[in-house]
Image (cartoon, helix red, strand yellow):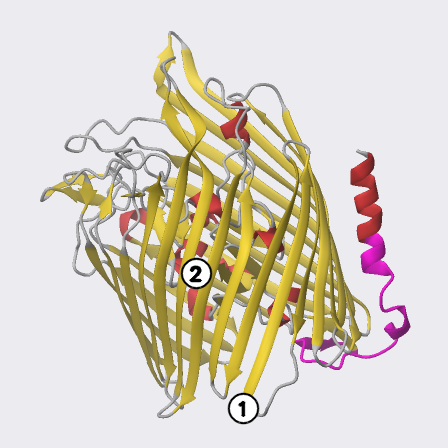
Amino acid sequence: MRSLKSLYLCSLSFLLLPGLSILAQTPADSTPVFDVDTVRVIDHRSLLSDYDIAGSTSRLSVSRAERSDNMADLLSRQSGVFVKSYGAGEGLQSISVRGGGSEHALFLLDGIPLTNMQLGSVDMGHYQLQTFSEVELYRGGNSTLFGSGAISGAINAIVRPVSRFDYGSRIKSGAFGARQFSAFLDLPSGRFTHALRMSSANSDNAYAFQIDGDEFERRNSDYRQQEADYLLSFGISEGQMALLQTHYSKYGNGTPNAILTGDGFQGNARSKSEQLLLRLKWQQDNGEGHRRVMQAYLRRDWRHYENPDLAAGTDVLRSQHFNEEGGVIGQYSALLTSQLRVYGGFEGATGRVNSSELRDTQRRQRMAVYSLSEWQPASSQKLTPLMSAALRYEYDTDFGDRLLPRAGMKLRYRNWELFSSLGSNFRVPTFNDLYWAPGGNPNLQPETSTAVEIGSTLDWRRFGIWQLESAWYFMNIRDMIRWAPTSNGFWQPQNLDRVQSSGIETSLSASSSGGRLQLHANYKHGISRRVNNQNQSDPLHRNRLPYLPAEEFFVQVTGAQKQWQLSLEYQHASFRYTSIANLPGAILPAYQIVNLKASYEVAIGSHNARFFGRFDNLLQEEYQLILNYPLPVYQWRIGFEITRH
């Protein structure tokens, strides 16, 4: 514990001592700001947003039309991301980035990790987009910047700021009894700004699905969700702000069994979950590119599962889980010279899990310090090089310490850019992996990986604005954890696998000069394989991981004319194996999905009214993303939104 305290003191001095002489200077860079009674308040973007991180990174702006969607909807349209769904509405929506598992992609809110400590994953369907203005998608290994769990990527959601008095509400209904209501209020008041977002959604969700051409109905799949977010900002002085956020969500749903034969026995199991996040943030822009951020947070996660179909006498199977983590985060960003920019920070957190399925209450503490430097050597007018290096030191009470280096390079020539990166990453086992009763394995070691990528970006303006990006990546995961049967009759996690994932991603974005016509398309070809170089006669050697398509293709065309907007989407994924055995008959076939969106907006006095509709799976494709969890053969939603003009 003495080493932890020393690390805290070193980290605080790192953040607080530099730059004391520039406290009185005014911002001189391009950081987004807005005025509140002459006090300039910094936007809520991540400090990393200002860095040219070598690697494939997308900053996804959440449009008004997308605020009625959830995080899984947004990510499913991005290159290199595959969403695995266990059902519509009520089912878990997990993601795979570049062929990794859901536990290999870290989800954060403004740098605060939200990944469940017990499960190691996040249900992306539970996060509505109305709270966020931007989502940063970091593809590839990023543990150097974000820590454990960012082996294949990281998703960082940015809270939507308040710039003026605004309010609005939205109602939406759809197939299978779906209903949703949401409202927001943005209220600047002197140095204070208040932002309140609320939503409620529920559905019978008794949707139709098909198996071998026969139509059935999904039962015990209803759900109900409530979400509330309150954000209070205070402009302390020029370029300095404090922020308090409370985010709460509650979700209850049926959890039907997998469909094994026909419509099968779908069961009566029920699940409930609640999440609470409290965070306090202080941010200061001292001018000339110097910024500091301090955050303290507390997050709690309650889950309850009950299955009356599995009972011993009158005792119904019940399980309860409580996760809690509190921590502090400090970050510092500085433009030291015209050629050198540095970014650094520290993290400290303590967490505990109390679960009916684990052995006793489990606790873990972690600490980290890290830095990123970007150096731009002397360049010509046409050729501009950019070098970057990052290093992270991390310590946790379960697995000790580790060093994680990362290096990158960018080379710009006119409107063309070449980038490459190489780094080390890791993921510590979850509490379920270590202590599940029975079956947990306290002897597990962390997963580690090396990730490399090379890519390019080309921008040009002719008949509009165009951007073409492509990247080749390779990821080698060692000691990958896999649950396997034991001689005792139960399953246990073990460091069994080495996995290699490689592929090519390409994306194209285009917009007409007036912005009335937009195109977004992406294609990925990638394969994740289990390898056993020590025993190549292993029957699983070079086998593909299940539920991951080798090919994905997505294209979206959006057109606007006066008050109308129309968007057409096409999505294709190739076949997927349903087990690591890669049996020829055990596959989910390829699918093609066509979706249509339309909206009409009109001014009514001092307000804007927007009517919108969405129609999914127009071809009525029979498909599954996870075996025996069929999805609807069609789905539609219509709604009305009114906001202040």
Residue 291: image tag: none
For residue 37, say whether it is visible.
no
Looking at the image, is 340 positioned above or below residue 230? below
Camera-nearest residue between 591 and 582 = 582
Looking at the image, is 500 positioned above or below residue 164? above
- Image coordinates for residue 520, horizontal then vertical, percent: 35, 73
Q: Is residue 328 left or right of residue 237?
A: left
Camera-nearest residue between 158 and 641 = 158
Q: Is residue 174 magenta?
A: no
Give the residue type at disc 2: Ser
Q: Is residue 500 left or right of residue 380?
A: left
Residue 382: image tag: 1
> Which quarter of the picture shows residue 47?
bottom right
Specify the segment rendered in magenta.
Answer: 12-38
Identified at 55% across, 45% down, the residue is 426
- Image coordinates for residue 345, horizontal then vertical, percent: 72, 56
Identified at 32% across, 38% down, the residue is 221
Q: Is residue 19 magenta?
A: yes
Q: Is residue 32 left or right of residue 93?
A: right
Give the residue type at disc 1: Lys
Sequence-first disc among 1 and 2: 2
Q: Secondary structure at mark 2?
A: loop
- Image coordinates for residue 218, horizontal then vertical, percent: 24, 38
Looking at the image, is 241 positioned above or below residue 336? above
Camera-nearest residue between 584 and 538 = 538
Q: Secondary structure at mark 1?
A: loop
Identify the residue position indicated by label 2 in the image.
68
- Image coordinates for residue 512, horizontal then vertical, percent: 37, 87
